[in-house]
Amino acid sequence: MWSINDGVPVPKPDSTVDQERKVNNSIDIFHLHEKRIVRERNKIRIEIQKLVNKLRKGEDVQETKSKLKRMVRDTEKLSRTAAVYLRGHKDLPDVAEILQID
């Protein structure tokens, strides 16, 4: 599952019919399409983008990396959402390091 830019959960475009069914069932069962949850995911996306922009500009790098690390920590609310949005910026070495991608 992934979220389009507005935080609405949808199956990945390359999903099989079975995968789509599972994703749609999860969305329904866990109410992942509720406006409150969608808004929270969208806030995470906006915050990730703001922090990544700071990294790209070289601004407050250590503080920014700390914030991003905290956001993707398993104990944080919507950490998987943060990781998914952050993964879109894995071209940055700092992001790859945070996500522990080689």
Image (cartoon, rainbow, N blue to C red):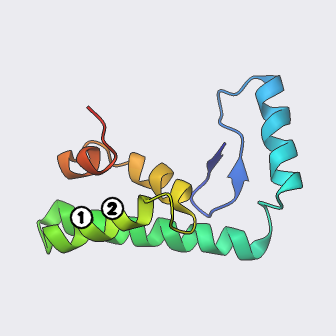
Tag on residue 9?
none
Q: Secondary structure at mark 1?
A: helix
Q: Residue at x 69, y 59 (%)?
A: 8
Q: Quadrant of residue 21?
A: top right
Q: Position of residue 88 (x, y in %)?
A: 40, 47
Front-lying residue, 8 or 100: 100
Image quarter of the N terminus: top right
Distance of label 2 from label 1 (alpha carbons): 6 Å
Relative placement, left or right, of 50 versus 26 is left
Kindly check if marks 2 and 1 are in contact, taking CB atoms under 8 A apart as contact. yes
Point out the residue furthest to the left here.
Answer: 58
Tag on residue 69?
2
Q: Residue at x 20, y 52 (%)?
A: 94
Q: Position of residue 7 (x, y in %)?
A: 63, 62
Q: Residue at x 40, y 65 (%)?
A: 48
Q: Quadrant of residue 33?
A: bottom right
Point out the residue furthest to the front here.
Answer: 75
Image quarter of the C terminus: top left
Front-lying residue, 62 or 47: 62
Relative placement, left or right, of 65 versus 13 is left
Q: Secondary structure at mark 2?
A: helix
Placement of 47 over or under 33, stated as above or below: below
Per the image, the residue denoted by label 1 is 65
Q: Position of residue 27 (x, y in %)?
A: 81, 52
Mark 2: few, some, or many residues within 10 Å (few <14, many ≥20)?
Answer: some
Front-lying residue, 79 or 42: 79
